[in-house]
Amino acid sequence: MNSSDLELVYDGSRGRQQVGMRFLNVTIPQGTEVKNAYIRFTADETSSSNVTVTFFGEDVDDAVTFATNSGNISSRTKTSASVDWTPDPWTSEGATHDSPDLTTIAQEIINRSGWNSGNDLVFIVTGTSTNKRTADSYRGGASNRPLLHIEYCTP
């Protein structure tokens, strides 16, 4: 919760983990067609080991704040849509890396009947590897935090 970085998805002291990222005030109208969606990460550490992670969304209308209790992220209901990512090596700290297209996940959430423009949206990253990619988190500095990019068309 208070880490300056995000280990996707293995932490040497804690083992495998699920990582949650909450994006506030996502101003996209309900039912809008999403054309492209991705998360831009800033590398906090270099790593060239093979790793595959899986993205999900939290399957709710308006995602609530994370809590510090154990299992807070892993117990959240995940979207049926998911996207796997095997990132290229991260060879330079501070370099940016874009996730693959997360449109199916974003669309599933934005299509929910209770979704409203301005709601909060959570992405959850899971995996089974003992390798990782380490990105800056919001607590590591607002300028290097993960950024959600969504392109859409209004009807």
Image (cartoon, rainbow, N blue to C red):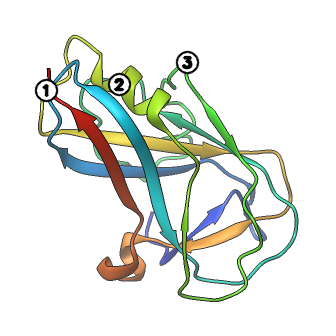
Which residue is under mark 3? 80
Residue 145, image x and y in percent?
A: 39, 71
Q: Tell me the crowding category of disc 3: few under 14, some 14 to 19, or many 20 or more residues within 10 angstroms, Cα based.
A: few
- Is residue 1 or residue 150 the one in the foreground? 150
| 88 sits left or right of 8 in the view | right
- Is residue 129 or residue 146 the one in the foreground? 146
Residue at image point 83% right, 63% down = 131
Q: Which mark is first along the chain, 2 or 3?
A: 3
Which residue is under mark 2? 109
Q: Tell me the crowding category of disc 2: few under 14, some 14 to 19, or many 20 or more residues within 10 angstroms, Cα based.
A: many
Q: Which mark is first along the chain, 1 or 3?
A: 3
Q: CA distance from mark 1 to mark 2?
A: 10 Å
| 16 sits left or right of 108 in the view | right
Which residue is under mark 1? 116
Q: Amino acid at mark 3?
A: Ser
The quadrant of the image that shows the C terminus is top left
Q: Tag 3's secondary structure? A: loop
Q: Which mark is first along the chain, 2 or 1?
A: 2
The quadrant of the image that shows the N terminus is bottom left
Q: Most extreme residue toward the top, as rendered?
A: 113
Residue 112, image x and y in percent?
A: 28, 15
Q: Are marks 3 and 2 in contact (CB under 8 Å)?
A: no
